Image (cartoon, helix red, strand yellow):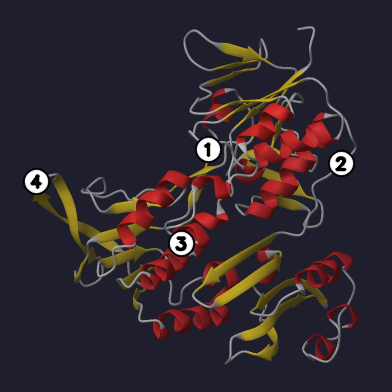
Amino acid sequence: MTTRRFVIIGGGLAAATAAETLRDEGFDGDIMVIGAERHVPYLRPPLSKEYLNNPAKEPAETYVHPWDWYHEHDVHVLTGTLAVELDLVDNRVILDETSSVGFEKALIATGAKPRTLQLPGADAAGVYYLRTLDDSEELREALRQGGRKVVVLGTGWVGMETAAAARNYGNDVTVIGRGAVPLSGGVGPELGAIYGQLHRDHGVQFKLQRGVRALVVAETGGGPAVTGVATDNDGEVIPADIVIVGYGAAPNTEIAEDAGLDVKDGVLASAALVTSNPLVYAAGDVANAVHPVLGRRLRSEHWANAIGGGRTAAKSMLGQDVVYDDVPYFYSDQYDVGMEYAGYVPLAADTQPVFRGDVAAREFIAFWVSGGRLVAGMNVNVWDVSDDIQELIRSGRAVDLAKLTDPNVPILEA
């Protein structure tokens, strides 16, 4: 191969960011992005937020870059193309029985797929998942009619955001979850209870500490369609025209596993995002990389991780001495409540939050302090503070709780 070629397997935000960074850093070889979806790389957060909530939004409004950008920057994007094999003997990506592409280095950015409902009738009409842009369009079309009976399975971020969207369109919504409060796995029981009350205030019904025993399905002229959900503790049947499955996501590691790369809850990678093969890198949802601050592996499925990881992986592919040590960040919009979370969920998990602001009015900041230092912060309807929260977390210095919770003291002075 006379011309250098870097191949990016996956067509999401991490892939687009890596391609952009390679060009920004002066790489003048071939860049090929191989994406299984029909779209160029797009942003996923809007799929359960502003895109899902606004029928006027067009697909192109979610794109990381317009189609023309890839042509202008000489990035070859293969959409609707599945990479079926990563050949690490001949350093080629196999696309099908007759075509393949060679590479000098490869980046695995294959993202994740939704965890599916393993019950009879799970493929019936009216059962929806939310992972792709096409999924969001289909669900939006179903919800926008209003007046439907919607059952959401799962109380994580996707479940709660889709529940909010369903209510915004005037549907009846019931949420079924195993936990005692929604979102407890992400932000703990106290913050989860605040979000639970937010949804109740908007008319959402909860069936908590229970799972799903069966889907009730009826034959229609168009085939089987869901009509209800039976819970597993008491057999109660909740009527449903629409069932949204929000059971989280699993990393798309198949191509890495088949290639013999080390895989465990994602593709294992160093802090520089190098996998067990020195010519292959991993970034985004699929990467389970060593985080130098935590001193342990951390796999994150949030958009900021795709940006930061894609950028770091690109620089690492170019031989730069880099590590991926960003403070994890994500955001959520539900009804009239917006929030940003920055920090380390594993470190905050066993810590009680402290608050600054008006919790009752849902205008506050929650802080998680461990070992005397700030490990996470979540601002709810309070803006322009996330950068300061992240800077304080990165500093690793001791904080004064009295100052941290005092709205009159700047966060960086706590």
Please identify the quadrant where the C terminus is shown: bottom right
What is the x, y in percent for residue 227? 17, 60
Identify which amino acid the numbered label 2 is placed on.
Val
Residue corresponding to mark 1:
252
Rate crowding at label 2 as few (under 14), some (14 to 19) or many (20 or more) other CA atoms within 10 Å. Answer: some
What is the x, y in percent for residue 101? 62, 14
Question: Which is nearer the N-term, disc 1 or disc 3?
Answer: 3
Identify which amino acid the numbered label 1 is placed on.
Asn
Residue corresponding to mark 2:
322
Q: How many discs mark residues in the rendered view?
A: 4
Can you tell which mark lies on residue 54? 3
Question: Which is nearer the N-term, disc 2 or disc 1?
Answer: 1
Residue at figure coordinates x 81%, y 57% from the top left: 293
Circles 3 and 2, Cβ within 8 Å, touching? The answer is no
Rate crowding at label 3 as few (under 14), some (14 to 19) or many (20 or more) other CA atoms within 10 Å. Answer: some
Residue at figure coordinates x 36%, y 69% from the top left: 169
| In the image, residue 272 above or below residue 329 | above
Can you tell which mark lies on residue 221? 4
Please state which of residues 238 and 11 is positioned toward the viewer in this rendering. 11
Q: CA distance from mark 2 to mark 1?
A: 25 Å
Please state which of residues 289 and 203 is positioned toward the viewer in this rendering. 203
Q: CA distance from mark 2 to mark 4?
A: 58 Å
What is the x, y in percent for residue 212? 28, 62
Query: The residue tagged with tag 1: helix, strand or loop?
Result: loop
Circles 1 and 4, Cβ within 8 Å, touching? The answer is no
